[in-house]
Amino acid sequence: MPTYQDFKLPDLGEGLTEGEILKWFVQPGDEVTLNQPIVEVETAKAAVEIPSPYAGVVTALHHAEGETVDVGSPIITFDTDPSGAAGEAPAGVDGGVAAPAQTKVAAAADLVPQIPSEPGLVGGPAPKANTEEKIEVLVGSGPKSGKLTRRPRKAVATAAPAAARPAPKPPARVSAAAVGAHAAELAGEVRVLAKPPVRKLARDLGVDLRAVHGTGPAGTITRDDVEAAASPGGSEAPARLVAAASDAGAEERLPIKSVRKQMANAMVASAFTAPHVTEFVTVDVTPTMEMVERLKAAPGFADVRVTPLLLVAKALLVAVRRNPLVNSTWDEAAQEIVVKHYVNLGIAAATPRGLLVPNIKNAERLSLPELAGALGDLVVLAREGKTPPADMQHGTITITNVGVFGVDNGTPILNPGESAILCFGAVRDQPWVHDGELAIRKVTQLSLSFDHRVIDGQLGSQFLADIAALLADPTLFLAWS
């Protein structure tokens, strides 16, 4: 008899609750081997290829590409004993077959541990639904038991002529605009959305609201619409403008999910939790740029990409060693500042899916060529959407390089859980006083945003000044290392 195995979407990172099916690599009827990639899933952290936990034949795909799936939900079913006698099975997604109840299913099919908990809580089973009783889930409080019934509808009276039918009394808490629109509909008139002050303005100006095209939310007519309609030759202007905008596709709606949703939530949490302070410094980095050119020609850097960001990262690592409190986090629950004597260096990377901040683990232990190689690999994987979830976790301090976009500077928001982020601006040729004379030099701007609960102005200024000094005079790497 066939043995069907359900594979459920696992947690691909710390605390992730859902993932989007980007691409299926298999279809029902395909024979797969152990650890063969079967699906690409995008989570709030990154896009990950999931290998097959079984060898056998695919019998069902439970979700189509583009669907968002909760962690713990079945996504695919395998027949691990395809040579057994065929059993009756209902049709599944994309023509697949779901495991029938009378068919043997191995206990190990559930690859996501089922932790006993109340229905409706995070990590617990979904509430059972039937036609007689429904469990209402209260967020943060578990399910609310008890039968829920719907209030019976009132009988609809026989239709009467519009003129003889009185307007029903509007329900409480309904806006005046909605009441007016409801009455107009009952009277057989054109539905008009406008607030009472706008209606009064229209009466004063002699404007028929039925001939005005509203440009406000949900087509609401605004004061500007009425005034434009009242102007000479302006009665049709709003309608023409809106029609032209609609024809040109002036709006586009993008779903907020996966990486972009996680980024938005993290930035809001950081901005309204940690008190941000940002400081700026302008630096003559001519010696650093000269050093970059020398390193490019050095044999030890033949297989890696050398950029100014490499020396900025190295300068930050040296400055962290001189100012260790910068590399720490605020533990609100324990009321402690946790100083970390390792540096998981995050690099903000712009990708088609949104902003990612993968980090290089124990970056302070790497030599300059090793750091260059790690930076190159990190950026490539991020842009391809192949960053492992582990590389997105446990960062301690971050660099954002806005200079690659030709931007001089910025006020970056802290990566959640970190106390500092360095912004590296564009390097430009600028007039600069050098050795007492005006000269054209390579100049850039650095900014440092930090959590003022952990880092005071003196520490933040000293840290930023150390980085600037290293970039202005790279020989200090030898003196401070």
Image (spheres, rainbow, N blue to C red):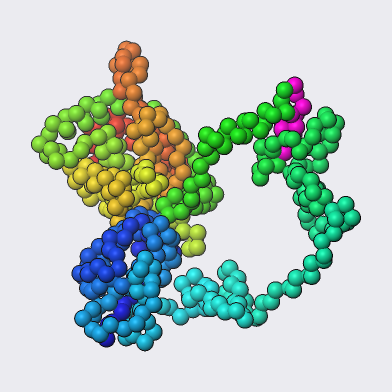
Quadrant of the image for the C terminus?
Answer: top left
Decide if residue 481 is on the left or right side of residue 133: left
Q: Is residue 227 magenta?
A: yes
Front one among 157 and 132: 157
Where residue 311 appears, x then y in whole percent? Answer: 26, 36
Decide if residue 76 is on the left or right side of residue 333: left
Q: Residue at x 38, y 58 (%)?
A: 65
Quadrant of the rendered structure where residue 105 is? bottom left
* Magenta residues, start to end: 221-232
Quadrant of the rendered structure where residue 134 is? bottom right
Q: Is residue 271 magenta?
A: no
Where residue 49 appears, x then y in whole percent? Answer: 29, 59
Q: Residue at x 40, y 46 (%)?
A: 354
Decide if residue 367 is on the left or right side of residue 318: left
Front one among 24 and 235: 235
Tag count in the figure? Answer: 0
Front one among 132 and 375: 132
Where residue 83 appears, x then y in whole percent? Answer: 21, 81
Q: Residue furthest left?
A: 299
Q: Residue at x 39, y 84 (%)?
A: 101
Q: Is residue 342 visible?
A: no
Front one among 298 and 23: 23
In the image, residue 29 above or below residue 444: below
Q: Residue at x 36, y 56 (%)?
A: 22
Q: Residue furthest top?
A: 437
Decide if residue 448 is on the left or right side of residue 162: left
In the image, residue 57 above or below residue 25: below
Q: Is residue 377 visible?
A: yes
In the image, residue 274 above or below residue 78: above
Quadrant of the image for the N terminus?
Answer: bottom left
Where residue 460 appears, x then y in whole percent? Answer: 43, 40
Q: Main secondary structure of the magenta part?
A: helix
